[in-house]
Amino acid sequence: MGNAAANATNFSAIFKSATVGNFTASRNIIGSLSTANSIQTTSASTGNAQTLYGIYSEGTGAIVVEENQIQNLTNATTNATAATRGRVNGIRVNAGSSNAINSNTVRNLTIANLNNAVDLEASAIGINLAGAVANRTVNDNRISFVSNTNASYAGFVFGLYFRSATTGTNTVNRNFIHNITTTSANAAVAGIIKSTSAATFANNIISLGANATGQIIWGFYDVGGADNTTNLYFNTIFISGFGGTVSSMAMLVNSADNTRNFRNNVFHNARSRTGGSGSHYAIVYNAAG
């Protein structure tokens, strides 16, 4: 779709505009189950930010996205401006009185630009939950093979970006996230990044690093903040493969301001190095207190 090199062709397979009303997207197949690049925004988009979404909701009301299969989406932008926010997301939800994002399969999302955003506008995200929404559930999803393939990329790739209100019941349970990658030694990948929120994460499995060398890796990255609560129960996070001059962490806590309850988790970092100065940790507390 779209082939003028400087122009962007933005595409959402299913889109809910910023209007009032409940919304359900259920049991859709978006993209071929077997053919690579089956949905592709083909413009190089060298002068603009090009976006590609499987399901995108900006609307209010009860938002339900369940049992969808989203795969083989390619954003062909090669935009070389770091501040230009071209991106590919399997699912993105910005708002709502409540969100239920459950039992979806998101896989094989690819982009190759230089968007260096470190938040909800990162170049490649499997499931992207922006906005301070209360009563947000993200359960039983499978997210895999999300990548930025630009060798000079210096941004982030996430399996799940999660933000919520600090009120209500917010849960992220029984998700399986693996093979979140880049090909650049300047980039970072994370299975789950938790932005400002109060939420419980339980029985999730994250496996990263087996087919990635040289990138910073975070299994779970807790950004933290005042009035935030992070409950982690019975999660398994495994980091493997070979690193170089950069480090990896199964669990990274980046703020001392929030309340943390971590119980009965397995944080296993088996990543090694054959040279360089990178270090590999099970848990890092990057804050005082």
Image (cartoon, rainbow, N blue to C red):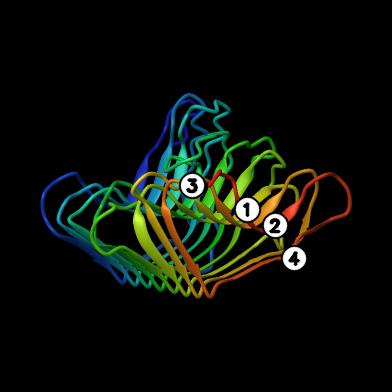
Decide which of tag 3 and tag 1 comes sooner along the chain.
Answer: 3
Front residue of this view, candidates 276 and 56: 276
The residue carrying mark 3 is 256
Q: CA distance from mark 3 to mark 2?
A: 19 Å
Relative to 103, say whether 101 is above or below.
above
Q: Are marks 2 and 4 in contact (CB under 8 Å)?
A: no
Find disc 2 in the rendering and name its residue.
281
CA distance for labels 1 and 4: 15 Å
Q: Residues within 10 Å of mark 2 (few under 14, many from 20)?
A: some
Residue under circle 1?
A: 284
Q: Earlier in the sequence, mark 3 or mark 2?
A: 3
Say whether residue 109 is left or right of residue 163: right
- The residue positioned 69% from the left and 59% from the top of the image is 209
Q: Tag 3: Cα neighbours inside 10 Å, few (<14), some, or many (≥20)? A: some
Query: Mark 1: which amino acid?
Result: Val
Q: Secondary structure at mark 3?
A: loop
Between the residue at mark 3 and the residue at mark 1, the CA separation in whole angstroms equals 12 Å
Q: Are marks 2 and 1 in contact (CB under 8 Å)?
A: yes
